């Protein structure tokens, strides 16, 4: 099973999805995947998103030969073929080269040369033809690597994302109950699988505490998308409406919108695609502003969240970063009532200098009040919002851009996905459909208030539950 890159500890990522502290929802440096929060596993100062999907949100079909050519070019480089600066300039997208110099990339290549030559032992491609994940094996007998390559179809198939991750060989258990037992051993667990063929999230087919409120990381963005759907339905917003980029909404990665120039604009649809497919934090905060915080809080209620008060006031990603990274502000926030919290968000949190908190972000490698300063939902809550979103054509399309983990058996005709993580938290939530008309939601959170969790094993086992359901 090959999991998408945001579910694996990165060894190296260089790509378009901008450096925060050195972070990303993607992955990197100190990776930001909750909004997507920093992780302690990376070794570089760049970041990616929570997805392997292209960061170009208007999907253009890539020429397979172009993707193959770029893959052969990078594999040749890993095996010692020269990649001079002029070739670098025409091979990599402008956004990539804005963050990674030719010299930096050459240093990376040098670190791989001693293990080579490298050969391909397996690969998977995204349906749109813009991305591939290849497993590479070295000749010296050391561990395999996974290489993720994403090209810009609208820019001469130039490379916008390049990621190397250590492979993780976890054997499937082939049994849902065994998978659930392993998940429960990793930390606190709330998981549920629901048959939603009748568009209801009733009694789960299986689960452990499916009504338990749990930290969910960036899965909160599902309710932001729901608020957008509500606004479009009410006629106060359109998918093609343009939203002006303002620096005051800049958050930390994951994402790319924080790098868009102030005064430029993106459509609501593009921001929504970025928010879900690459878990773009700044795009999320722009959408929260566009619909209004109160509208997202209302969407919690209309989408059937059982405990919406846990998410009031509804935090933006920038606000959560400030709370996580500034101990004094977080302390005041956690003891305040809802009115006091709103006052803090409007004052000290809004006034905080996020750049000044980057050293704290780089040091964020363990759980920080994940049971108090977070977004919360139960698997049943996630089921209800996914079902509601899947009934809207635009939202349904947005949810399907990034599947979270490859459907290797080809069981599903539709996969809608959103997940989230930060140190100590992992959530994965899917709505899937098969050709026979079966329709299911699988949602689960694994977390610890004190320790990092084994995200890779958790992601693998949750994906097994997804693919074994109702067999």
Image (cartoon, helix red, strand yellow):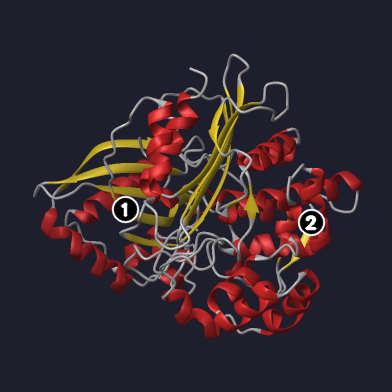
Residue contact between numbered discs 1 and 2, judged by CB atoms under 8 Å: no
**Residue 67: x %, y % from top left:** 40, 43
Dot 1 corresponds to which residue? 165
Q: Residue at x 65, y 53 (%)?
A: 221
Q: Residue at x 59, y 14 (%)?
A: 436
Instruction: Name the residue: 57% across, 35% down.
Output: 192
Q: Is residue 259 left or right of residue 116?
A: right
Q: Secondary structure at mark 2?
A: helix
- Local packing at callout 1 (Cα closer than 10 Å; few below 14, some 14-19, many 20+) is many
Residue 101, image x and y in percent?
Answer: 36, 72
Task: Estimate the x, y position of residue 287 in percent, counting from the top left.
Answer: 73, 60
Instruction: Say left or right for 278 vs 125.
Output: right
**Which residue occupies the extreme top position in the image?**
436
The image shows residue 395, relative to residue 242, as above or below, that is above
Q: Nearer the viewer, residue 259 or 313?
A: 313
Quick check: can you spot residue 66?
no
Q: Whole-percent x and y of residue 388?
A: 74, 37
Which element is circle 1 on? strand
**Does residue 207 appear in this view?**
yes
Residue to which mark 2 is pinned: 297
In the picture shown, does residue 107 fall above or below 411?
below
Instruction: Determine the CA span between mark 1 and mark 2.
Output: 38 Å
| Residue 451 versus residue 410 in the image, above or below | below
């Amino acid at each position: 099973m090959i999991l998408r890159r945001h579910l694996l500890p990165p060894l190296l990522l260089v790509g378009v999805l901008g450096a925060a502290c050195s972070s990303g929802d993607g992955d990197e440096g100190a990776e930001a995947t909750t909004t997507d929060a920093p992780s302690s596993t990376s070794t570089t100062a760049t970041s990616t998103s929570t997805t392997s999907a292209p960061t170009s949100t208007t999907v253009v079909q890539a020429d397979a030969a172009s993707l193959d050519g770029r893959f052969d070019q990078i594999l040749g480089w890993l095996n010692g073929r020269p990649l001079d600066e002029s070739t670098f300039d025409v091979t990599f997208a402008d956004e990539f080269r804005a963050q990674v110099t030719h010299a930096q990339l050459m240093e990376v290549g040098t670190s791989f040369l001693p293990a080579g030559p490298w050969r391909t032992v397996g690969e998977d491609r995204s349906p749109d033809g813009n991305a591939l994940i290849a497993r590479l094996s070295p000749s010296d007998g050391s561990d395999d690597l996974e290489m993720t390559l994403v090209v810009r179809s609208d820019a001469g198939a130039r490379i916008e994302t390049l990621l190397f991750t250590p492979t993780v060989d976890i054997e499937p258990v082939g049994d849902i109950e065994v998978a659930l037992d392993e998940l429960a051993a990793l930390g606190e667990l709330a998981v549920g699988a629901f048959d939603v063929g009748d568009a209801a999230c009733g009694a789960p087919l299986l689960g452990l505490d499916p009504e338990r409120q749990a930290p969910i990381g960036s899965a909160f963005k599902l309710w932001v998308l729901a608020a957008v759907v509500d606004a479009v339905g009410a006629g106060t917003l359109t998918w093609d409406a343009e939203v002006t980029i303002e620096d005051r909404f800049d958050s930390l990665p994951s994402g790319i919108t924080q790098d868009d120039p102030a005064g430029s604009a993106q459509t609501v649809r593009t921001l929504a695609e970025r928010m879900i497919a690459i878990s773009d934090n700044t795009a999320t905060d722009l959408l929260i502003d566009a619909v209004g915080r109160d509208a997202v809080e209302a969407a919690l209620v209309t989408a059937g969240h059982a405990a919406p008060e846990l998410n009031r006031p509804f935090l933006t990603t920038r606000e959560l970063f400030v709370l996580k990274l500034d101990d004094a502000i977080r302390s005041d926030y956690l003891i305040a009532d809802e009115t006091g919290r709103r006052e803090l968000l409007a004052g000290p949190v809004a006034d905080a200098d996020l750049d000044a908190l980057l050293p704290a972000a780089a040091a964020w490698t363990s759980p920080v009040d994940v049971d108090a300063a977070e977004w919360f939902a139960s698997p049943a809550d996630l089921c209800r919002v996914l079902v509601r979103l899947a009934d809207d054509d635009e939202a349904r399309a947005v949810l399907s851009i990034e599947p979270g983990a490859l459907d290797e058996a080809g069981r599903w005709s539709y996969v809608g996905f959103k997940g989230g993580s930060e140190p100590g938290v992992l959530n994965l939530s899917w709505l899937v459909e098969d050709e026979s008309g079966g329709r299911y939601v699988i949602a689960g959170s694994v977390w610890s208030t004190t320790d990092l969790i084994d995200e890779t094993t958790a992601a693998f086992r949750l994906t097994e539950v997804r693919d074994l359901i109702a067999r």
